[in-house]
Image: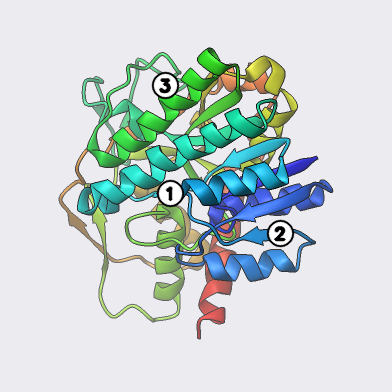
Amino acid sequence: MKILVTGGCGFLGSNLSAAALDRGAELVVFDNLSRTGSAQNLEWLRGQGKFTHVHGDIRNANDVTRTIRDFAPDAVFHVAGQVAMTTSIANPRMDFEINAGGSLNVLEAVREHVPEAAVIYSSSNKVYGDLEYIDYQETETRYVDPAHPQGLDENTPLEFQSPYGCSKGAADQYMQDFARVYGLKTLVFRHSSMYGSRQFGTFDQGWIAWFCGQAVKASQGLLDKPFTIAGNGKQVRDVLEARDMSRLYFAGLDHIERAQGQVLNVGGGMQNSLSLLELFALLEELTDTQLQYEKLEPRFSDQRIFVADLAKTSALLDWSPQVTAREGIGDAVAWARQVMMANR
């Protein structure tokens, strides 16, 4: 099988690319190496197997069209994107050009040159807005949503908020519409939080990797002041580890004939949900270190709780998460230590 991974040197992309190589696929990795850590991920991938790297920009229709025309992939994992809410607010035009325009470039190239190819797209729970209409309850460590004990399903009303929500939501809708109008084999994953190896987290994106890094630094006496968090720390996400995420995308590919045109909420499910405070308690246990942090104002449009109801995803793709949050966070701490040693 011939697989193209856009953004193939990012966190999602590098894990998917490595999984494709493990499966013996002929692989093209499309990435402009602009994201922090992407160059390191490219070098790591070169040790995993043989593939072709195209140094292209998803915003450039010629780059995208030439790659898809010449390679003629059987499947496209479209995970290239601008991924930070804060960046979208600072530069909404760039955010739109990458997320919405870049996705349209992919769809048009597939429609013209390889209309039988599967296209699996990484959308976001941010298409649902801030969810402030939900009747939350507040406990000692987290917000809870009693009306949705298994999380939110795909019938949750759309409410694009922030430039990021708008650009990801627009691409999300284009993916569905190209299935309806042109018969393309598209599948949309509306992701909750993902984490794991090959993720170089920053303050505004990749929160688990970022806080694992802060905990490792604290355990080694390398923090000279407390780190900061947005909000009170009770906001909740269900977390999906990279190995389960890779299994998810290939399950989507294996079942594309029955899944095409669908939208699926994906994450770790309620059993793998964590608040920031609960994550910190786990990190303190894993690093044997008391974490010191200061609270800032909540971020604009931040959801107090989002957990994906996995019923539709599990039924359609015969998939469910296998890596527990405790196991995955332990591995993420080990990855953070590895990154820190490499940067010394």
Q: Residue at x 50, y 86 (%)?
A: 344
Q: Residue at x 37, y 66 (%)?
A: 290
Q: CA distance from mark 2 to mark 3?
A: 39 Å
Of circles 3 and 1, the one toward us is 1
Residue 152: % across, % down: 42, 21
Is 117 on the left or on the right of 281, as rendered? right
Q: Which mark is residue 59?
A: 1
Disc 3 and disc 1 in contact, CB within 8 angstroms:
no
Q: Quick one: label 1, few (<14), some, or many (20+) residues within 10 Å?
A: many
Amino acid on which disc 2 is placed: Thr
Residue 312 visible, this angle: yes
Disc 2 and disc 3 in contact, CB within 8 angstroms:
no
Q: Secondary structure at mark 3?
A: loop
239, 157: nearer the viewer: 157
Q: Residue at x 64, y 18 (%)?
A: 259
Residue 48: % across, % down: 76, 63
Q: Residue furthest bottom?
A: 344
Residue pointed to by mark 2? 52
Q: Quick one: label 2, few (<14), some, or many (20+) residues within 10 Å?
A: few
Residue pointed to by mark 3? 152
